[in-house]
Image: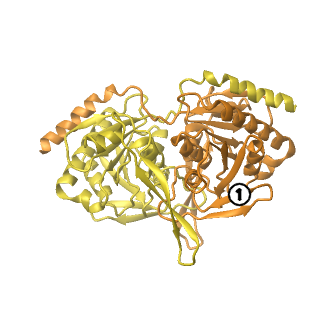
Chain colours: A yellow, B orange
Amino acid sequence: MRIVVTNDDGLRSPGLRLLYEAVRELDEALVIAPMEQASAKGGMLTLDEPIRVYELDLTYASAYGITGSPRDVVHVAREVFGGLDMLVSGINIGENTSIQNILVSGTVGAAAEASLFDIPAVAFSADVNKPSALTERGYADFAVSVARAVARYVASEGLPSGVDLLNVNLPRSPTSLVRVVPPARRRWIEKLDRRVDPRGQCYYWLYGEATEPEPGTDSYVVFVERGIAISPISLSLKAVDISLLDALVTEVSSALKVKS
Amino acid sequence: MRIVVTNDDGLRSPGLRLLYEAVRELDEALVIAPMEQASAKGGMLTLDEPIRVYELDLTYASAYGITGSPRDVVHVAREVFGGLDMLVSGINIGENTSIQNILVSGTVGAAAEASLFDIPAVAFSADVNKPSALTERGYADFAVSVARAVARYVASEGLPSGVDLLNVNLPRSPTSLVRVVPPARRRWIEKLDRRVDPRGQCYYWLYGEATEPEPGTDSYVVFVERGIAISPISLSLKAVDISLLDALVTEVSSALKVKS
């Protein structure tokens, strides 16, 4: 079994090293990741530019750096390295709770791309704000233990039917509280900070103000209960009750009949 | 009611003009779009760079061009222009059927971002491969009629509960066949084309080979039935049967107990 280990913080991220440590004993672990930081590019594929693949020595493992996005990694693994049986992504520096974060996360994006090709995938993120908080001894041991246990389970059992990937978020401090919960809807209210450049021209910075987490969601587990949140994610995107749209079909049909 | 009209092909796209024509009579229509082509950046927010907003005259409308992504447009509308009541995105040059396309589409990404802020949103895409195919007289009339009928319906009725956005795909030729269907899972099998640059170094281009569409999906409607596919999209990402993961919780807990 070949497990691809990737990351959206780039090849130099200590989260990548911890994740490699977590899974290396399970089977063949192959590190392929974007050369540079590629956060908030979860939904990006590199179509307009070439992708280059560089072989590198990371001291702890040989690895491949690519010039593309985390999603591209899946296709490089499939097409250049002969395929993959499982993908683990992370450990991201910064949490990825809530639908809002999941949809733009590079960490989760790589896992989503793998799952579209029926490859079991797990995304790991930690609610830490800098690399040194992740590698602090007690925390690194905790993070590696969780990642190894989850990866081992998925490698041996696979994912339940209807589950496309697991999104795992670790709280700021080690804990043994583990909960399986769906993602919250929103974690942030985006704001634009208006600024003026030295030439007197206006520009904006996008940032998010945190919202109050709703009980029973991944954000609540991580920020209020300070537990480990495991969210089984379905990518079906299917709305359940679509019969209400019959009237819409009628409207569109009428508009087209009037035309012709 | 203020309707924001956006696009991921950039401000110069004729699809943006057609969509503006479709909705301008409904209420106040405000055009805000990325300055440049931003396809396959559906899951991207601009966090590491400033966003600039430029006022422009598009001859058919005054408009605002931004240096960010389609998702950023929603936040520029909320924070710089005082909010929006509905968002329409498109008409994209190129279809956006299947989960695979939806997750990376800038056209759908803008709509998804709006829906996270409880703003009704519709994404429109057409199975045409160049701007001139979209603006060919008979086709442009068809596309505007469909977009207007759908936008008018959503503006007056809103979206059914549990539906976050509508993803509308138009077939290559005008038709009056309309179907409400969920998205297909996969539209492409991604490939990497290996090439050698003039200095003898290897690089890759990512592209997709189309798969056979499954009946009852958006791809099937557009490519086999040649109809208009309206897909009500849920962004809940929630997997239904999560009880099977109890064993995983036990495994993670045990791993952590062994450590401590």
Q: Compare residues B244 and A223 and report the one nearer the observer.
A: A223
Mark 1 secondary-structure assignment: strand
Q: Amino acid at mark 1?
A: Ala
Residue at the spot x=26%, y=50% of the render?
A172
Q: Compare residues B102 and A52 and report the one nearer the observer.
A: B102
- Quadrant of residue B233 within the rendered picture: top right
Residue at the spot x=81%, y=48% of the render?
B135
Q: Is the N terminus of chain B in the top left, top right, bottom left or bottom right quadrant?
A: top right
Q: Is residue A52 above or below residue A102?
A: below
Q: Is the C terminus of chain B in the top left, top right, bottom left or bottom right quadrant?
A: top left
Residue at the spot x=62%, y=42% of the render?
B85
Q: Compare residues A119 and B159 and report the one nearer the observer.
A: B159
Residue at the spot x=76%, y=45% of the render?
B24
Q: Is residue A122 above or below residue A9?
A: above
The spot of residue A19 in percent (x, y) is: 29, 52
Q: Which residue is mark 1?
A: B63
Q: Compare residues B235 and A190 and report the one nearer the observer.
A: A190
Label 1: chain?
A: B
The spot of residue A219 in percent (x, y) is: 35, 42
The spot of residue A116 in percent (x, y) is: 49, 39
